[in-house]
Image (cartoon, rainbow, N blue to C red):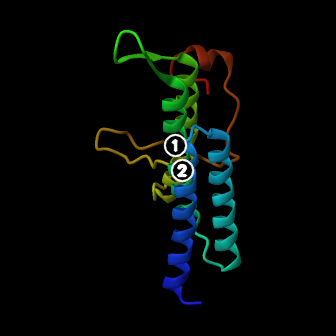
Amino acid sequence: MNLNLKKIASGLILVIGLILFFSSLLNNHLNLSLIYLTSTLIIWVLYGLILDDFDVRIFAWVISATGFLLAISVFFLYGVEEVPHPVGAIVFHAGGIAGALGMGLFSLFPLLIIHQLSSKKTTSPATHKLNENDATPDPELDSDEWEFATEKELQSGEFEAG
């Protein structure tokens, strides 16, 4: 199948799913709109896997976008309510706002993971560079020609105990 046709069909699946999502959301059927959204994502992923056209980065973007879309929907359905008196007054509900913020937070995770994976920051162990002020380290002596210091030699101040 032509590559452009694959991408057009893949995008068409997402567009049809979004149209179904918004049409059921306008009728205040959040459960039905969640069914449309979830089934659209499953069909889209299966289509990409069957035709070997699945990209994890695009999947992360789509999952994040649908999560944010769902969070905005929950905010306006359950977090904001227009009351009749006084005219035009709006009441905010903490439960709906908290749910929308939680969904928005979890929608950030795929983007953060993709950002971490794509960043080319490789941390290498820091090497200590000798400055002019730094003294050169004493060389380690691997010699068997040493003897024990006596107590008198240690207290004389000429030697250091190591």
Counting from the top left corner in percent of width and height, residue 129 is at 38, 48
Q: Which residue is mark 1?
A: 26
Q: Which residue is mark 2?
A: 23
Q: Position of residue 95 (x, y in %)?
A: 58, 19
Say above or below: 74 vs 120: above
Of the pair 87 and 121, the residue shown nearer to us? 87
Q: CA distance from mark 1 to mark 2?
A: 5 Å
Residue farthest along the top direction in this orientation: 86
Count neighbours of disc 1 (C-alpha within 10 A) and say few if under 14, some if 14 to 19, many if 20 or more: few
Residue 159 in sight: no
- Residue 1, by quadrant, is bottom right
- Please report the residue visible at 58 percent of the width from the left and 59 percent of the height from the top: 17
Query: How far across and down, in percent of the image, does residue 56 sit?
Result: 59, 64
Helix, strand or loop status at disc 1:
helix
Residue drawn at the location 52% of the way across and 38% of the way down: 73
Q: In this picture, is 120 found above or below 74? A: below
Q: Furthest residue to the bottom? A: 1
**Residue placed at 36% from the left, 9% from the top?**
86
Between residue 114 and residue 3, name the one nearer to us.
3
Secondary structure type for disc 2: helix
Type of amino acid at the residue the image marks with label 2:
Ser
> x%, y% of residue 20?
57, 55
Residues at circles 1 and 2 in contact by the CB criterion of under 8 Å: yes
Q: Residue furthest left?
A: 132
Q: Quadrant of the C terminus?
A: top right
Amino acid tagged 1? Leu
